[in-house]
Image (spheres, rainbow, N blue to C red):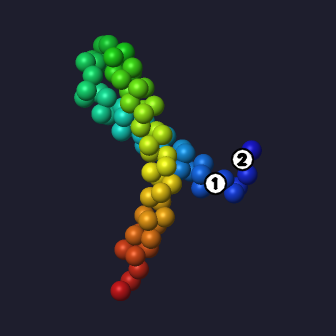
Amino acid sequence: MIPPRFAGLLFALILSGLMSALVAGIASWGASAATLQDPWPWLAAWRRAWLHAWPVAFPAVLLMAPLTRRLVAWLTTPR
């Protein structure tokens, strides 16, 4: 089991992996010659795009999370 002190890092790792996979999949579909009958070109393009996107997405989530939390707190504070 992973110690609770790593919860923030684990959250960022999972979130960045899922979101980069989703975005890479959508972008790759439009850029590939795949069809529903033959998805292999898309799968290859998606895998390449995701493997490049995740190493960028993970530190981005780590860096942007504190800023996002402050922005949300500011936007939801009654004035």
Q: Residue at x 44, y 43 (%)?
A: 56
Image quadrant assignment for residue 31: top left
Viewer can see residue 43: yes
Amino acid at the residue labelled 2: Ile
Of 53 and 4, nearer the camera is 53
- Label 2 Cα neighbours within 10 Å, binned few <14 / some 14-19 / many ≥20: few
Q: Would residue 34 appear left or right of 55 to someone viewing this image?
A: left
Quadrant assignment for the C terminus: bottom left
Q: Residue at x 25, y 29 (%)?
A: 30
Circle nearer the N terminus (2, 1)? 2
Of 31 and 52, nearer the camera is 52
- Label 1 Cα neighbours within 10 Å, binned few <14 / some 14-19 / many ≥20: few
Residue position marked by numbered label 1 in the rendering: 7
Residue 29, percent from left and from top: 29, 27
Which element carries disc 1, helix, strand or loop? helix
Q: Are marks 2 and 1 in contact (CB under 8 Å)?
A: yes
Please determine whether, in this image, residue 58 is positioned above or below residue 52.
below
Q: Residue at x 66, y 53 (%)?
A: 6
Residue position marked by numbered label 2 in the rendering: 2
Viewer can see residue 18: no
The extreme bottom residue here reads 79
Which element carries disc 2, helix, strand or loop? loop
